[in-house]
Image (spheres, helix red, strand yellow):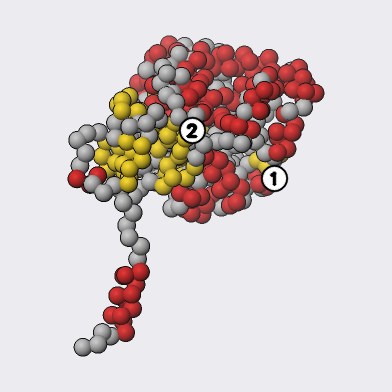
Amino acid sequence: MRPTRLWALLLAATTALPAAAAPILFENARVFDGTRDLGITPVLIDGARIVHVGTPLPAAATGARRIDYTGKTLLPGLVSDHAHVGNTQGLEHGDRFYTHDNVVRDLRQFQRYGITTVTALGMNGADFFAIRKAVNSDPGLGAQLYGAGGGIGAPDGAPPADTMGLSHDPVARPRNAEEARAAVAIQHADGVDLIKLWVDDLGGKRPMMTPEVYRAAIAEAHAHGLKVAAHIHDLEQARDLVDAKVDILAHGIRDRAVDPMLARKMRDQGTWYIPTIAIDEANYRYAEHPLALQQPFLRQALHADVLARWSQPDWQRTQLASSGVAAARKAVATNLDNVRRLHAAGVKLGFGTDAGAMPQRVIGVAEHRELQLLVEAGLMPSEALQVATTRAAALLGLTDRGRIAAGKRADLLVLDADPLVDIANTQRIGTVWQAGQEVAGPITE
């Protein structure tokens, strides 16, 4: 009997399907699994997932494609809890640059630098949700994207629409508790991953979100099952937000030393703390270390206009002589001290840098510098790596990443040198894998 046309079409479609890719076995690499050093350990992935770590190997390893990573160190892909995308173009910044192509550009840069998950913490345009859906289904479009939509700020206050270039201003700016609850409800319905609040008077220069507004927003977010991350700068705002049960302090406290009572309360409530030490240092670091501009790791991350500006000796001298540099240095010193205090007290640290919000907050580079600053604050290299992997994923409630373990996503960073010996070795990127796909290689000229 001759097959029907439908049967023939089905048979052709079936035989035309590509063969499933073989599992991949990474051999001879030193493995830091996100919590500890496993030593030289094999890792088996199949498709987008890790299926086995260690010996003896399972039967599934038979016929696997083998990759010899002798001399390499294997880490989980880094996770950023605080960044921005689609907000810069060369030396300029603003929401006029929030397009699909620019967001993908930024996510690819994060990915090239080993950051495979990115949280865009506010100032996202209306296309955020469509872009998130697209990039999270295709590793070729860059790091996975999560975020807070536009976020919630203060009328005429932070984030300042004029200086941040928010001509279309996606930020909700409620004036009272009722409007705060409505803003949260709208953002929840839109599908945000968390709520972002800006609680900062910018050194007394702008109106600050009132306690009535942020307390109502936090309570409403919790009623919808959403965590709340608050932009802060000073100790006073941090104290009141912790009293209001905020989930995440999205910047370090930079005006005064954290007191033991606040540290204990944060620990006991489980408040997360994202230090973002690198943001203030970025105001002077590149002017102070111009030779770094010749290194591919930094040079390849910079737009041509930024590189040209920063390479000018006149710009370097002017930048270092500016009135804000002394304040930035003090903020870094205070931030480092507070990280030391809070870590010693057992407060949970998240990982982020505000990269992408301004040109000097260099996507990818900032994250590797933040790891060095965490070590400078007193963390062991292994602890800094835990913050950037396992703990950063836990802050977001993402249980499928941040670890090299069976069942987790195969988001992996392969390094040519051991970061447990020197944290600066995280810059020695060999290969980046995302969802089991090799998506980036070494950063060279």
Q: Is residue 22 left or right of residue 194?
A: left
Residue 18 against residue 190 in the figure, above or below: below
Residue 28 against residue 13 in the figure, above or below: above
292 vs 345, nearest the viewer: 292
SS state under label 1: loop
Residue in view at x 40 percent, y 30 percent: 72
Residue in view at x 40 percent, y 21 percent: 420
Q: Amino acid at mark 1?
A: Ser
On the image, the x and y values in percent for residue 135 come to: 48, 50
Residue furthest out toward the right:
314
**Quick one: quadrant of the C terminus?**
top right
Point out which mark residue 330 bears.
none
Q: Around disc 2, counting alpha carbons within 10 Å, would you say few (fewer than 14), some (14 to 19), or many (20 or more)?
A: many
Q: Amino acid at mark 2?
A: Ile
Q: Is residue 188 left or right of residue 155?
A: left
Q: Which residue is disc 2 drawn over?
A: 429
- Note whether residue 443 is visible: yes
Tell me where residue 164 sits by quadrant. Answer: top right
Mark 2, mark 1: which one is toward the viewer? 2
Question: Mark 2 to mark 1: distance in Å?
Answer: 38 Å
267 vs 276, nearest the viewer: 276
SS state under label 2: strand
Q: Around disc 1, counting alpha carbons within 10 Å, would you say few (fewer than 14), some (14 to 19), or many (20 or more)?
A: few
- Note whether residue 183 is visible: no
Residue in view at x 54 percent, y 25 percent: 369
Q: Which residue is disc 1 drawn over?
A: 167
Residue in view at x 80 percent, y 23 percent: 314
327 vs 430, nearest the viewer: 430
